[in-house]
Amino acid sequence: MRADLKKSKNNAGAPSPKDANTIAALKSDIVSWPSVDEDGVTLIGNFIFKPETNFFRIYMTAPTQAATFESSGNPDGRGAMNKYVGEHPGTTKEAMSFIKKHMGDEFVLIYGACEDSLEEKKVMGSRCFPLILTASGKDDKDGNVNTLTFEQEIINRDFIKFYSGDVSFAQPKVVADENVALVKADGPTYQLPATAVTADVEFTASNFEHGQIVTLIGGGGAAPLLLKNTPAGTIPVLLHEATNWIGLKDAVINLKVIKAEKTYLVEASRK
């Protein structure tokens, strides 16, 4: 059956004022990417970063921001390229240093309307087709601005994707042992320790909401921790085909919080 493309909501085509602080990440900082759902545009899971790195913010005057894509290519190779443009005001030392440091670097941008902070954000850029930064500037009678342009360089079929995962700027919560308490204030990402004696991960508590994604990062060691399919656990864990997950160093598993008669954790993806 083919799906209809219906009208989404009233005024869906009206301009959507952007949040002035666009969320950015450098491709080189990301060690694990969210999986792409069957619809081809929904990202499942969280971005996982190298130690001491994370998302950061780029201020661009809100009305100047424009997110676009344009189809092109020959009949046997059609695709599109994403492009994000905005103006950063002033020829400041900080702005010039940022441009000098990151010109030509590979980015992922996460953006949305200023009132959509709790909803899905839009994403441009991916592991295979990141956005490349170029810049231009002017300081004249009409203004003093730097135009930042983030654009893919190769025709692709990425298009815009949608992300409801973690966009906090904190490091993952470090867990001391196999007992993991999921606390929203600690964020949704948990770093397991390296272990010399294997043990089974057990979730002792959770106050996350239905539908949220929590992520475990393996710590490795001589005998890594193990996450098993445990339907009878304190907080039941349901893994795909009941296949155990081994907490090897930098291995990742994403678990979706399901609230029914009790809280369940259901595997969303693993890497």
Image: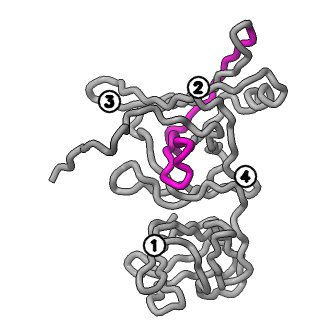
Q: Earlier in the sequence, mark 2 or mark 3?
A: 2
**Whole-number angstrom distance, CA of label 4 to CA of label 3:** 36 Å
Categorize mark 2 by other alpha carbons within 10 Å: few (<14), some (14-19), many (20+).
Answer: some
The answer to whether the residue labelled 1 contacts the one labelled 4, judged by CB atoms less than 8 Å apart, is: no
Q: Which residue is mark 4?
A: 53
The answer to whether the residue labelled 4 contacts the one labelled 3, judged by CB atoms less than 8 Å apart, is: no
Mark in the foreground, 2 or 4? 2
The quadrant holding residue 239 is bottom left
Q: Is residue 239 left or right of residue 74?
A: right
Categorize mark 3 by other alpha carbons within 10 Å: few (<14), some (14-19), many (20+).
Answer: few
**Whole-number angstrom distance, CA of label 2 to CA of label 1:** 40 Å
For residue 126: magenta? yes
Quadrant occupied by the N terminus: bottom left
The residue lying furthest to the top in this view is: 141
Q: Which residue is mark 2?
A: 64
The answer to whether the residue labelled 1 contacts the one labelled 3, judged by CB atoms less than 8 Å apart, is: no
Q: Which circle marks residue 267 in the picture? A: 1
Callout 1: SS:
strand
Callout 3: SS:
loop
Q: Position of residue 61 (x, y in %)?
A: 65, 29
Residue at position x 71%, y 81% from top? 195
Mark in the foreground, 4 or 3? 4
Q: From the viewer's perspective, is residue 221 above or below residue 235?
A: above
Amino acid at circle 2: Thr
**Whole-number angstrom distance, CA of label 2 to CA of label 3:** 32 Å
Residue range corresponding to the magenta coloring: 112-140
Q: Nearer the viewer, residue 263 or 47?
A: 263
Q: Position of residue 66 (x, y in %)?
A: 52, 28
Q: Which circle marks residue 77 in the picture? A: 3
Q: Position of residue 249 (x, y in %)?
A: 65, 68
Residue at position x 65%, y 22% from top? 147
**Whole-number angstrom distance, CA of label 1 to CA of label 4:** 26 Å
